[in-house]
Image (cartoon, grey):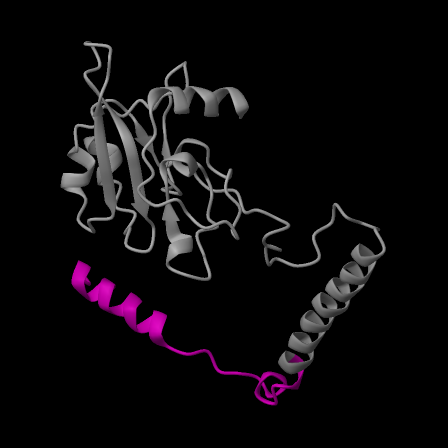
Amino acid sequence: MATLSDQLLHRIREAHRRRTLSWWERIYLPAIAQGLWVTSVHFWRNLFLHLAHRVGLFRRIPAAVTVQYPDEQRPTAPRLRTRHRLMQREDGTPRCVGCMLCETVCPAKCIYIVPGEHPDPSVEKYARSFDLDLGKCVYCGYCVEVCPEDAIRMDTQRHDIAAFSRDGMWLDIIELLHPGSRKHTDPPKKFIQLELEDFRRLKQSG
């Protein structure tokens, strides 16, 4: 009676034993013809749909598997870390209390905060200036995890972080509070310091 190890060894040998190919399979011409047929079907279908899209036809049928960025955005998971944003209070002032925890814990040292005194004793401080250099950021998410006020998040679902210069990767406090408010051609306002009334006016004008 064969033992369990003998049965296992026999099954392994049977799995590794190659099947003998027939003469029709050895000439490889049917396989080549089948591959050319599949490739041709996809090529002519995609070409037809691309030309149809040019004239406004069959827009709902994708012409290729490739995502046509930026006209077409690929859906991403909500937990994906994307560009940063600062949370606001109801009056438009930043929720940040200037505790400096995110600046301290940042391994890339890309966060720069200038705190200011808040007239409300329950708040104590606020961020007069909050700058973030995306050219140094490693998207670790430590700033989001360490913040006790939930003042900074990475849930904008924005991936357009490319720029023509290092200054273009700089996010000032206005851009962080209102993502997308600055054009790519506009120079950043580095280390700009705002008062509470300035934040409220930005809220009303936006």
- Kindly identify the residue that appears in the image at 64 percent across and 50 percent down: 71
Q: Which residues are magenta?
A: 1-30
Magenta residue check for 29: yes
Q: Main secondary structure of the magenta part?
A: helix
Q: Report x, y in % for residue 162.
A: 45, 56
Q: Is residue 105 left or right of residue 81?
A: left
- Kindly identify the residue that appears in the image at 79 percent across and 55 percent down: 53
Q: Is residue 47 left or right of residue 196?
A: right
Q: Is residue 18 left or right of residue 13?
A: right
Q: Nearer the viewer, residue 171 or 77?
A: 171
Q: Is any part of residue 3 visible from this angle?
A: no
Indicate the quadrant where residue 194 lies. top left
Q: Extreme top residue here?
A: 121
Q: Identify whether 16 is placed above or below 27.
A: above
Q: Identify whether 60 is placed above or below 90.
A: below
Q: Identify whether 58 is placed above or below 94.
A: below
Q: Nearer the viewer, residue 38 or 136?
A: 136
Magenta residue check for 188: no
Q: Report x, y in % for residue 80.
A: 38, 41
Q: Nearer the viewer, residue 187 or 53?
A: 187
Q: Identify whether 39 is placed above or below 67.
A: below
- Kindly identify the residue that appears in the image at 27 percent across and 52 percent down: 138
- Kindly identify the residue that appears in the image at 26 percent across and 41 percent down: 141
Q: Report x, y in % for residue 72.
A: 62, 49
The N terminus lies in quadrant: bottom left
Q: Nearer the viewer, residue 159 or 31?
A: 159
Q: Report x, y in % for residue 4.
A: 18, 59
